[in-house]
Amino acid sequence: MDAGLRQAEVDRNEAVLREAIADYRQLVVEAIGEVENALARERKQLERIRQLERQLSLAERSSHQLQREFINGVTEYLDVLTALDDEQELRRTLLSARRELLEYRIALYRSLAGGFTFGKA
């Protein structure tokens, strides 16, 4: 008697289940994409930091060399000040790059957590 109703209910439940599985698959694909993007940003930022560290090392050597040349009367003090200014600018840029790396790492951890939120006290 109610076989048709029961079969319709089974079919509806199966359709709901298929939809839930499809939604879950899409969520997993998006989560994997977020993690991959976060890892790529972190790798790129680490390379940028290495380049800035090399530039800073060269700027420090240049600054020290110009200071020695100034002491020996070979160069003007303006050259020393310009080199120091360049060195300080590189230090600020390096600090900003390291801060960005931390922000990228936080984004990575959030992606890995999958939307987990901490309870409020």
Image (cartoon, rainbow, N blue to C red):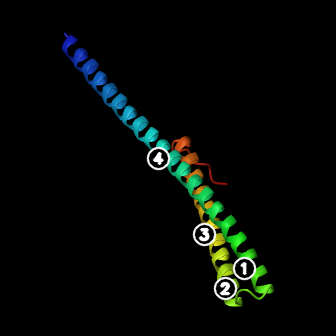
- Indicate which label's residue lies in the foreground, 2 or 3: 2
Q: Under tag 2, what secondary structure?
A: helix
Q: Amino acid at mark 3?
A: Thr
Question: Marks 1/4: CA distance?
Answer: 43 Å
Q: Nearer the viewer, residue 55 or 66?
A: 66
For marks 1 and 4 on the same chain, the one whose residue lies earlier in the sequence: 4
Q: Amino acid at mark 2?
A: Asp
Q: Position of residue 30 (x, y in %)?
A: 41, 41
Q: Which residue is mark 3?
A: 93
Q: What residue appears at the point 19 percent right and 9 percent down from the top-left corner?
A: 1
Q: Nearer the viewer, residue 6 or 80?
A: 80
Q: Under tag 1, what secondary structure?
A: helix
Q: Are marks 4 and 2 in contact (CB under 8 Å)?
A: no
Q: Nearer the viewer, residue 65 or 51?
A: 65
**Taking 11 as reference, is 34 left or right?**
right
Q: Are marks 2 and 1 in contact (CB under 8 Å)?
A: yes
Q: Which residue is mark 1?
A: 66
Residue 79, label in figure: 2
Question: Marks 1/3: CA distance?
Answer: 22 Å
